[in-house]
Amino acid sequence: MLSILASSAFRRVAVVAVAFCVAAFLLFAFIYWQTAVFETRRINGLVERQSATIAKAPGEQLLWTVNTRSAHDLHWVSFAAVFGASGDLVAGNLRQVPPGLPLDGKAYRLDLTQLDPSRPDNEPVIVVGRILPDRRVLVLGRSIEQLAELRAVVIRALALGVIPALILALGFGMLLGHRTNLRIKAMQVVLDRVRRGHLAERLPARASGSDFDQLAIDVNHMLGEMERLVNELHDVGNNIAHDLRTPLSRVRALLERAGRVCTTREDLGQAVERAVVGLDQASGIITALLRIAEVEHSQLGASFGPVDLSEVAHEVLELYGPIAEAKGIEVRLNLTSAATAKGDRGLLFEAIANLLDNAIKFTPDNASVEMAVFDAPAGPAVRISDTGPGIAPKDRDQVFARFHRLDQSRSIPGSGLGLSMVQAIVRRHGFSVSLANGATGGCIATLLCATESGTIDAEPKSLGLPALPDQTPALQSG
């Protein structure tokens, strides 16, 4: 019970219920106040008009009117009396002129005991006193006890309406608090299992769209990312040990062999050079991993700005043009528009360079690679197409994992971290990268520089990219 009363759901319902009661009280008080003011003004005007009318009647008619008025008032609601100049009662149901009553023909509010001291109750009365032309005094009054009855009715209606509503609201709050506690306890059980290492656990979530369900969905996304990172860290540790063991073992074998076999300075220098190459390979793997970690965890928002993707593509082509030319590969650059993205220029250069480097690596000698910059419907994009072996659909997600290398690429130099770097840069910017196979073979890598986008089709027509030959300017690597 204490946990239910302390729950946020019960507290919110209780606050709303109290606010409702206060609002209802103020509303009823306002209604009563307006009714009382209106009724008091009406009675004031009525008594004043009646007093003025009776005062104009002749003497005998005036006395008859006062006696008739008092005789027919069985409930003591109306009061009327005529007093002589000396204050003695001539006619009516009052014993004396109320002390302190101004005789100016205006309505005043008095207590009934001021009109008749013998009456024990103290109900309010509207009274008008007026001096007649013959120096006699006319006093008319009317009880406004019905206003007190109206107040009692309002209070009774308030009690009959608000108190059950308050009890019902608090009961509903307790029920809601109990259900909330059950949801929280279920979440605590799952989070406790996650804390003990069961990262595959997920919070229960429904499709109701409530705050708890949205929170559960967000936490599940976070847990999924945590599980992915932990598994990736585990795989990275294994892959680092595997990939560093080969070059380090090779270096060790070279140095041992050099110590046993090398007899001249030249032979020893060659062995040292081969050992340095192996150490450089191991150092390159470590440097690439550190660079990926730097991209994933650094704060890059301040360095974001407009980036001309056409200029970046030109610079990448200038850097990798000689490498492609050495293999006899023709690299064509097609620009269909001045595509501008918002991001870090250096990182986008690195991502495009890694994609082009992969395309050149896996493209056979004397073939071609095509790089296009254009504005897709979802945003600016860069597409790099090669004529290599392509990537099977089942392997397209795995190639972005660190140290993952396909069977056909085992013989090609590399560490398996290039696409991991691209993935890290893409995630840091909120962009997307996709891989697909071309209609005639080869791999098509598309970097979509838009923070909110769906899937991107690998076919140029679906992105609004014109046919490349003879319609766009081309810059060849040679």
Image (cartoon, rainbow, N blue to C red):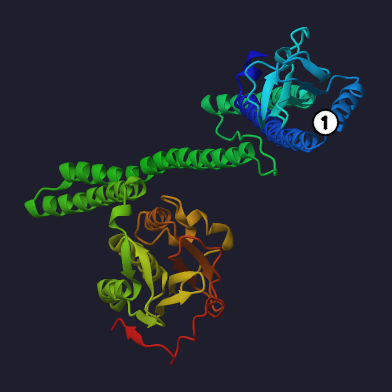
Give x and y (percent) for residue 184: 62, 27
Please state, as top left, top right, bottom left or bottom right, where the C terminus lies in the image. Answer: bottom left
Q: Nearer the viewer, residue 130 or 458?
A: 130
Give the quarter of the figure containing the N terminus: top right
The amino acid sitting under disc 1 is: Gly
**Relative horizontal placement of residue 101, taking residue 419 as reference (left or right):** right
Q: Residue 473: x percent and y percent?
A: 37, 88
What secondary structure is found at the residue carrying circle 1?
Answer: helix
Q: State the residue at coordinates (83%, 35%).
A: 58
Near-viewer residue (88 or 221): 88
Q: Is residue 168 left or right of residue 15?
A: right
| Residue 431, horizontal then vertical, whole percent | 44, 60
Left or right: residue 122 versus residue 478 is: right
Residue 422 lies in quadrant: bottom left
- In percent of width and height, residue 77 lies at 83, 23
Front residue of 255/96: it is: 96
